Image (cartoon, rainbow, N blue to C red):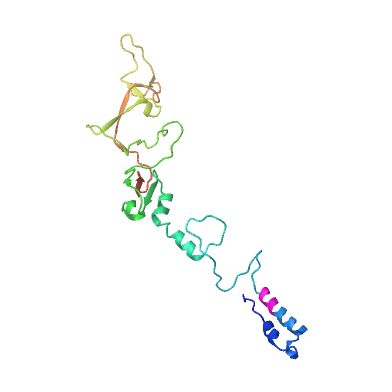
Amino acid sequence: MSDYTLAVNWSGKDALADADAAKVISGSDFNTEFTTVQTAVNSKANTASPALTGTPTAPTAAVGTDTTQIATTAFVEAGLGTITAAVVNALVYPVGSLYFNMAVATNPATLLGVGTWVAYAEGEVLVGKESSGTFDTLDESLGAETVSASTTGSTTLTTSQIPSHSHTVVRANNTGSGSEPARGADDGTGGMTFNTSSTGGGSGHTHTVPAHSTLQPSVTVYIWKRTA
């Protein structure tokens, strides 16, 4: 964008003698001057939607200025200088956040440069909190990896923990004994069988079963919780 400068030496004409023909202001002089003005004006940016070219300059506002004005390169660099990685990470990981890593066990305080972190949920999976029910308390550890065995190598289950089922009872014979009448059907060997009523899914007796795993499909990762 060019600046306007005089094309005709107007003051020089005033210094000439009145008899000097060059002192006369002609239409050509005006044409030259106004053409120069037109060229300079046309090269200026439109204030409504400027199409800037070259390397235009502008005043640099102080850091923290939030008024509507041009943000120069110097202004932006000065502002970004106060936005460090630690500042950004503090916004991304506020207190209470969890950090996961599949490669290194380094404390996030070192990796992110912010906060106090502790290893979290070691040997546990995460589940969303619900408003009521089993998972209605925040930060509560529940469940077990296995159903533990007793000293005899088995564990006791209550009736409510086993499927409903019945048992088959075999009597020695079907002739009855004393006041007890014969029941059931002859099994062809002189004995007899009959079924008990179903049980399970309610209170009552207990059963012993070997220890067994309750582990769900899982993937292990490093988990950290920000505490401060």
Q: How many marks?
A: 0
Which region is colored magenta?
36-42
Residue 96: % across, % down = 39, 43
Residue lying farthest bottom? 20
Please name the residue shown 53% across and 62% down the image.
71
Residue 173 vertical placement versus 14 (above, below): above
Residue 3: % across, % down = 62, 76
Residue toward you, 122 or 193: 122
Please name the residue shown 53% across and 65% down the image.
59
Residue toward you, 106 or 149: 106
Residue 82 vertical placement versus 217 (above, below): below
Residue toward you, 130 or 38: 38
- Quarter of the image where one finds residue 69: bottom right
Residue 19: % across, % down = 75, 91
Residue lying farthest top? 179
Main secondary structure type of the part rendered in magenta: helix
Residue 162: % across, % down = 37, 29
Viewport quadrant of the N terminus = bottom right
Viewport quadrant of the C terminus = top left
Please name the residue shown 31% across and 38% down the image.
146
Residue lying farthest right? 27
Q: Is residue 154 left or right of residue 38?
A: left
- Quarter of the image where one finds residue 22: bottom right
Asked if residue 224 lies in the magenta stretch, the reply is no
